[in-house]
Image: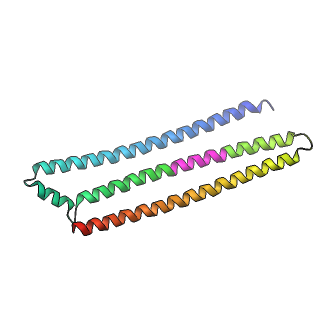
Amino acid sequence: MNELYPEQFAAAQKANLEAFYGLASLAVEGLQKLTALNMQAARSALADSQKLLTAADPQAFFTQQSGPNGALAARAQSYQRALYEIASSMNSGLMTIAGEQYEAHNRRVQTLFETLSSQAPAGSEAAAAALKQLMETSSALRDSVNKSVRQAVSMAEGGFEAVLSRTAKTSDVTTG
């Protein structure tokens, strides 16, 4: 039995390193996307600054930017949408990794529980049954919370999309 502990420890360490590298990769990917988005926004702002400096009439420049085909409002909405998509993909990736880690931890606890139950002294069946019921209840609670969080995120996404479309319509009406 003692020979299994180093193997289990090595397997757990490997799983933890894989999870860490998954999180690090996700963070770097999100940072790359965010940097690219901000560079694009900076280029756009620089181009607007050049147009403003070369414009004969600054008032005409601002009227053009906020007009019915106003680039400023469209770019702001585009930036918000892209930022939201980056955050949403990061959240999805984090939830996936967290779920995988939870499942792996749950399997390890169940294996440990089964090992301890098989080696438990006679008469401890009631305690083992209570622990098993506790584990099943905690797993059901986790599933319920996870489902509720997914529903809340879905509702928030719908609200965000509605706000963006309403903002686009409002900016078209006020500038048109």
Between residue 33 and residue 53, name the one nearer to us: 53
Name the residue at 83% across, 46% down.
128
- For the image shown, how many numbered marks are present on the structure? 0
Horizontal relation, residue 34 to residue 88: left or right: left
Residue extent of the magenta highlight: 92-104
Measuring from the top left, give residue 147's x and y in whole percent.
60, 58
Measuring from the top left, give residue 175's x and y in whole percent.
22, 66
> Farthest residue in the left direction?
56
Horizontal relation, residue 32 to residue 9: left or right: left
Q: Is residue 63 above or below residue 128?
A: below
Query: Per the image, is 61 magenta?
Result: no
Horizontal relation, residue 79 to residue 130: left or right: left
Horizontal relation, residue 112 to residue 70: left or right: right
Name the residue at 28% across, 49% down.
41
Instruction: Give residue 2's quadrant in the image.
Output: top right
Query: Per the image, is 94 magenta?
Result: yes
